Structures are given as structure tokens and as C-alpha cells.
Image (cartoon, grey):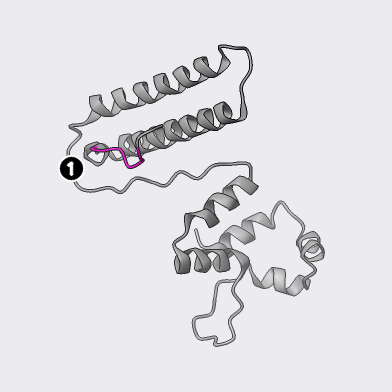
Amino acid sequence: MESHEVLRDVLKSTSAKRIAADLNLSLSLVYKWTEAPDPESITQSFNPLDRVDQLFRSTQDLRLIHWLCERADGFFIPNPKTVPGHPDRLMPATNEIVQEFADLLAVVATAAADHTVSAPEAKQIRARWEELKTVTEGFVRCCEEGNFSTLKTRSTPPRA
């Protein structure tokens, strides 16, 4: 879906007038964002979604995306890179998810053993949780594609 289409859909459930007022912009500019870009225009006004995309493409810095996801009370998990292959890694991939979950439970159990969770323990729990989500997302994507050859090695550094 193109950015202008996303914004058009958003305006079906949100007031363009409210957006314009909240951002201190003209109503016509907000509506302009919902139009397909004109490839012939030299004075084209990019919408905010296109600008964020351009900023990311320019920097390739995932902190931008992580920040945006955090602002939406979410988490970014990159899609695994796919290569042609065979579903020969289903069991090892399944075992990796089970192991990640066990590792998370071990961290939680250790942290909660004294009936409190310190800030460093909470940070360690968060790190294990993020790793489990990442591994699981990779597994789900491979299930959808029927290709487990992309799960050969862990892309994250070993845990502390």
C-alpha cells in the first residue's frame, strides 16, 4: 500500500480538520497528502510518511523505526531474509523457539526468586523477550513461505 493510500484510509476514521489543527497546517495540505504523487511535478510536496521513509532510506538506521514503533507502544521485528531452499530446518527451528522460551522463563524465574525484580533484571527480561519475539517472527515467516533454510544461524549476538 502506498503512503497516500494509507493516509486516505486514516482519514476515513479521523478528522482531517483535527489533524490540520493539531499539526498547525492547512486543511488543503492534509488532503494533498492523500493524493497520488505526480511524477511530472517538480514542486511535489511529500507527505510525512514518505519523509520518514526517505529519512530511513538515507540513514539505514533502525533506531528511527524502533523509536516510531515505541511511540505506538509497539516493537519492530525485521522480516527475515529469504533465499530459495527446502523446508529441511523445521524441527531445528521449532526447537530454537522452545529453547528461547525456556531461556526467557529461566531469566524470569531467577529474577523473581526473591519476590522483586530489579532494574537490571527487568532489562535482562526485556532483552530475552525481544529475542523470543524476533526468533518467533522469523519462524512464522518461514512457515508462511514453507522455507526453513533461512533459519540456519542466529542473527543476534549471544546472550549475556
Q: Quadrant of residue 25?
A: bottom right
Viewer-nearest residue: 59 or 93: 59
In this rendering, would 47 be left or right of 77? right
Viewer-nearest residue: 24 or 55: 55
Question: Is residue 154 one of those drawn in magenta?
Answer: yes
Going by the numbered disc 1, the residue's amino acid type is Gly
Who's the residue at 44% across and 62% down the image? Answer: 60
Q: Is residue 70 above or below residue 134?
A: below
Who's the residue at 29% across and 23% down the image? Answer: 95
Residue 27 location (% of width, % of height): 77, 70
Who's the residue at 80% across and 63% down the image? Answer: 17
Residue 90 location (% of width, % of height): 24, 28
Q: Which residue is mark 1?
A: 85
Residue 44 location (% of width, % of height): 58, 81
Residue 138 location (% of width, % of height): 36, 38
Q: Which residues are magenta?
A: 152-157
Q: Is residue 15 above or below residue 83?
A: below
In this rendering, would 65 be left or right of 25? left
Magenta span dominant secondary structure? loop
Q: How many marks?
A: 1
In this rendering, would 89 be left or right of 122? left
Callout 1: 10 Å neighbours few (<14), some, many (20+)? few
Q: Quadrant of residue 46?
A: bottom right
In this rendering, would 136 be left or right of 35? left
Q: Quadrant of residue 16?
A: bottom right
Who's the residue at 27% across and 37% down the image? Answer: 151
Q: Is residue 41 above or below residue 51?
A: below
Question: Is residue 110 one of those drawn in magenta?
Answer: no
Determine the secondary structure under disc 1: loop
